[in-house]
Image (cartoon, rainbow, N blue to C red):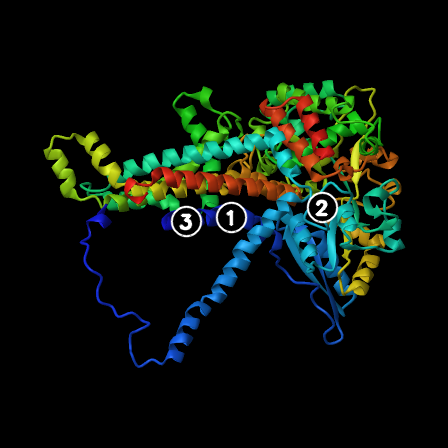
Amino acid sequence: MTRHASAVLRTSAFAALPVVIALAGCSSSSGTASGGGSAGGSTSFTLTYAKSNNVESPFEILAKEYMKANPSITINLEAKPNDTYGDSVRTQLQAGNAADVIETEAGSGQSRSIVPLAKANFLEPLGNTAAKMIPPGSEALFQVDGKTYGQPLGISYAGLVYNSKAAEAAGITAPAKDFDQVKAACSKAAGGGKSLYVLAGSTVPNAGITSLIISATRVYADDPDWNKKRTDGQTTFAGTTGWQQTLQTIVDLNKTGCFQKGAEGAGFDAITNNMAKGTSVAFFGPLGSASELQKAAPDQKFVAEAFPPATSGGKAFGIASATYSLSLNAASTKKDPANAFLNWLADPDQGDLFAKASGGLPISGLDKLDLSTTIYADVADILKKGDYTALPNSGWKSPAVYDALATGVQGLITGQATVDSVLKSMDTAWDQ
Amino acid sequence: MTTSQLPTEAPAAVPRRRNGGGERTPRANSLLKLGQWWWAVPGILMVVAVHYAATAVGASMAFTNWTGIGSFEWIGLRNFQRIFSDPTKLLALRNTLVLAFASVLLSNLAGMVLAMGLNRILKTRFILRTLFFMPVVLSPLATSYIWKFIFQLDGPLNSILEAIGLDSLVRPWLADPTWALWAVLLVVVWQNTGFAMVIYMSGLAAVPVEVEEAAAIDGANMLQRIWHVTIPALRPAIAIATTLGIVNGLRIFDQILALTGGGPANATSTLATEVYKQAFTLGNFGYGAALALLLTLIILVFAVIQQRLTQGPSET
């Protein structure tokens, strides 16, 4: 009996581990609290941001510029790994030891998104300066009950990062203008020993953004308010022809051999390697990565292109949104110096500096900008006319919907899922 | 068992502490008694607070809709209803059980064969034991990344298959819905076999050579000796190896996260990876806690059943 009891206790101890792990992850916290303070006449505050490589972050560049202009201010930088950034910030906010200024994301589709954090009273409302920086039509992504909780910093265009030299080498003289031309280009690239697109099919971010970029022309070009209709229950993913066409396009791209071999199991390394070597012509993603690729492969030439509409008569439409934003921790004891930093960032000069450092576009004055000599030349019309939508998932109910989409894309390529089953899983994730 | 062969001697005449040293006063004795249990209190409190209370709080989250931030509501068994109505979670449950039982079976069989083969006779047995045990001490995460490289489309495995003319078998093993789970299983078995081998070797050390020799003289062949002499003697080792194997098998996490991330399209997801995904990636802490609680109960049930099944008749 004693032996049985002790065995049960031992196994119970082992069995309890998963719950404890969950708790440990929930309660663990690292980093400093609203660190710093006034010492010797100087003021300090903390700034936390996501970082995914060794390249100097735009936030580091801006912080250094600010400290140079304001020697009495010290900004303590807290870089966090990009893949766990949202969870780390949420844990610290919950524990009360988050940084004073926090990198956030527009909308509600991610764990670092502004809306759920603001609704949980973790963010401090910002002033009019921040409100004026919100791109028209994107207010719902930065505001809750009329109050602004995030200050956008720059516009990020998401489309095709296109290697024009690799395209030339494959005999592709001009980017496709409709889907038939895309399929012809796929065959041409395959004939030249390349793939038209490289896809990191095993990663949620790349599989997801690929379908979002295609959805710009299939869904949001004709119905820019589709997200609102879905939120109001007036439509569903499964019941929308545009979404069916979006996923069918991915199936067709795969069948035509537009993706590289083994796309379903590929990671981000496949994108870096194929694009730098020129063995693939383009990939779906944010154009900020083009500048990093250009540094890694100076012999190639990376530019922005839009994924074309289904037919040549369709409307060219893209995705551009104020992805990066900064918010103020409601529990911060350094709100004044932190606010002064945010006000300084609102200056157009700082906007240009951020755009240059991040490889994106400035938050304001996009319509007056001369893009003809930049990597955005081929999508300049889309940007100037405002023919773009914010990243669709930033207006989705929860990260689970985007996860269902990305997982579904991998399933479409492996044959585990159908267009209908993926769309139904997205609706299920939305409704829960 | 060796323990049953120990001579049953009368206990040594050790004086009882209470009465030993007749010079102690009644007051000193009562203080000592008090101290005996008081000394354990800090440790007990720590264990209760850090382990059991934390576990209970975590388990209670399974009945809420907490997102990791802000307030939450008590929603009863809704999270569990959601688990059992979601095909992806049922697939994760199936994968968890398949991986746990298949890895226990295969790693224990391989471990037992290796232990018997390397028990005596072979001169190189010490080097071979070290080589077979080495995967156990290596980080599961690090070795999984090496295996990921091996399984890649342009990795060594496919290169070998191409070189020997088996081009039709070339595939992205970890992204193939049919093969991904078995590739993960192979890595898990490879890593766990050494541990089972060591447990069985310690068990074999307790099997008297004389008994085996006697069986051989009585005409038992090798298989009969293994079945009727070695295996019964290994029963305690089997109990330990399989219990630990099941518990660890049900909690497999590192290898899957590194090899497949639960893909392709959830084909290799398990309850442990789903706990991580729901709680820490998607911010569904309540739902993640429900999955964790379910996993805990499954581990508890199977560990207890397994303990009962492997107990010898003398211990009941």
Residue B73 image label? 2
Label 2: few (<14), some (14–19) or many (≥20) C-alpha neighbours in 10 Å: few
The first of marks 3 and 1 along the sequence is 3
Residue A5 image label? 3
B113 on left or right of B300:
left
Relative to the observer, which residue lies in front, A202 or A62?
A202
Q: Is residue A37 above or below residue A12?
A: below
Label 3: few (<14), some (14–19) or many (≥20) C-alpha neighbours in 10 Å: few
Q: Amino acid at mark 3?
A: Ala
Q: Amino acid at mark 2?
A: Glu
Residue A16 image label? 1
User: In which quadrant will I find the C terminus of chain A?
Assistant: top right
Quadrant of res B117: top left
Closer to the camera: disc 2 or disc 3? Answer: 3
Q: Amino acid at mark 1?
A: Ala
| Mark 2–mark 1 distance (CA, rounded to whole Å) | 24 Å
